[in-house]
Amino acid sequence: MKTDLPVRVPLHKPPLGILESVRTGRRNVLELIPDIATQVPILSGRTVKRWHMVMDPGALKRILKDNVDNYPKSVVTKLMLNPAIGDSLFIAEGAHWRWQRRAAAPVFSHRNVTALGAVMSAAADRATDRIAALPEQGDLYQEMVTATFEVISDVTFSGSKTFDRDATHKAIETYMAGVAKVSFLDIIGAPPWIPRPGRMFTRNVMGRMKAMADQTIDARRAAPKKDAPDLLDLLLTGEDPETKRQMTTEELRDNLLAFIVAGHETTALALAWALYLCAFDPAVQDKVRVEAETLLQGRTTTAADVPNLPYTRQVIDETLRLYPPAAFLSRTALGPDELCGREVRKGDTVILPIYALHRNALLWDNPDAFDPDRFADPKAIDRYANLPFGDGPRICIGASFAVQESVIILATLLSRFRFSLIDGRAPKPVMILTLRPEGGVWLKVEPIGKQALAA
Ligand code: HEM
């Protein structure tokens, strides 16, 4: 294992006052997590509102599972995402969440996700062509965003004449860039009536995109069934097994847009950070390459290969530990409770700083080091110490979709290219809704010829 460490967010040492946290938050929300959060189980304070940061696995289990009804998603999350994805599965609560989750669960069954593997393999091939055309180096984050957007748009609104992939991608990026600027006002608890710049503008962009999605859904209802159903087909026929309720066009659209928003950038980040880490540690990169080459013999990875690529999977797991795309979850306490012996009052903000949890010294040996061998035996890891996909009833519905896609694309690319770091261009992790590499992930790229492999 390498002794030097991959890039980190500089967590701050002394406690921050409110003005200072506003300034820091404008830069990087992750920097609001104090360094001490990587050494203690819980941290509480007040910045406008009372808050608790929880890094203790037992308390996290209570928030996400055992007492989940007391901890709905925070108002912040809803304010930010509602204009884009309505009251969809991602943000709904109570009965309205429950029926949508029941209706959508079979869409992400093992069988259906495996069947969607062909779309992921095709995206891996197209990424190969684009990367092969790069001039020796390139921004692999942008490449991965393109690849994962192709996957998610091909499994939601695929093959529809009315659906404009590029326009949708642009609309979502514009929207997210707009909310990212204002999200910090929400996180510190500023009331909803304070004007958030940009929200009006993004509303128009989203309006056009929603109209396009609705047309696509209506056209699909009328179209003959295809052999390989995509997420839209599956959701169209899906129903809540208890109430038999099916989704309206509007509900379908909000949920499909939720899959796009929740699913493409997060998976692109997992892949881009994995490529950075493999460039950072060439011995790990070679080990993935040997595993992939031995199995694939030059062909593209398929869904059926995924169980036979355990080391590649370990690299993805370790990447999601070090750079969890959803680095920060938040909840609002509905009523009083106790976490790690601390009093929680109604209305308190409960922050789940996944980034600090995954680097907490009480839970991990050498927490900042990149070591995929930690995941050699997944049973040896405390489930609530490693939460890249959350847990409990609101666990990410797309987790196995994302892992399958990441393994397919990573194994394919590492069997075809060697990636290495460029001096002075290390990526800088920044929290803008997700944990992004500011300025991209710039790497040198070298194609691997058959001869080079044989040597
Ligand atoms: C590496 C990639 C991904 C990561 C790290 C990730 C992470 C997460 C996390 C942490 C949550 C829970 C949020 C919370 O409890 O506050 C979540 C929920 C969700 N994710 Fe993902 N996600 C990924 C990929 C995907 C994909 C590919 C899809 C869909 C195709 C998806 C759809 C959703 C949805 C719909 C929810 C809400 C589920 C509910 O509340 O019932 N995600 N995700």
Image (cartoon, helix red, strand yellow):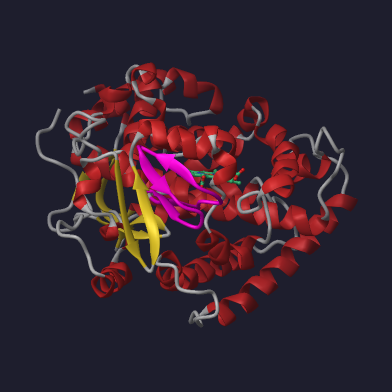
User: Residue at 70% of width from left, 61% of height from top?
Assistant: 163
Residue lying at 73% horizontally and 37% vertically, measured from the top left: 102
Q: Position of residue 297 (x, y in %)?
A: 41, 22
- The image position of residue 179, as x and y in percent, is 49, 70
- For residue 69, side relative to residue 381 (left or right): right
Residue 384 located left or right of residue 423: right
Q: Would you identify the image quadrant in which residue 224 lies?
A: top right
**Residue 67 visible in the snapshot:** yes
Q: Nearer the viewer, residue 397 or 71?
A: 71
In the image, residue 436 lies in the stretch drawn in magenta: no
- Quadrant position of the C terminus in the picture: top left
Q: Identify the residue shown where x is 30% and y is 72%.
A: 22
In the current view of this chain or complex, which residue is farthest to the left? 3
Which quadrant of the view contains residue 304? Answer: top right
Instruction: Identify which residue is drawn at 24% across, 55% down.
Output: 427
Write the start and end of the magenta stretch as one range.
328-353
Residue 338 lies in the magenta-colored region: yes
Residue 80 vertical placement versus 235 (above, below): below
Foreground residue among 112 and 71: 71
Residue 415 shows in the view: no
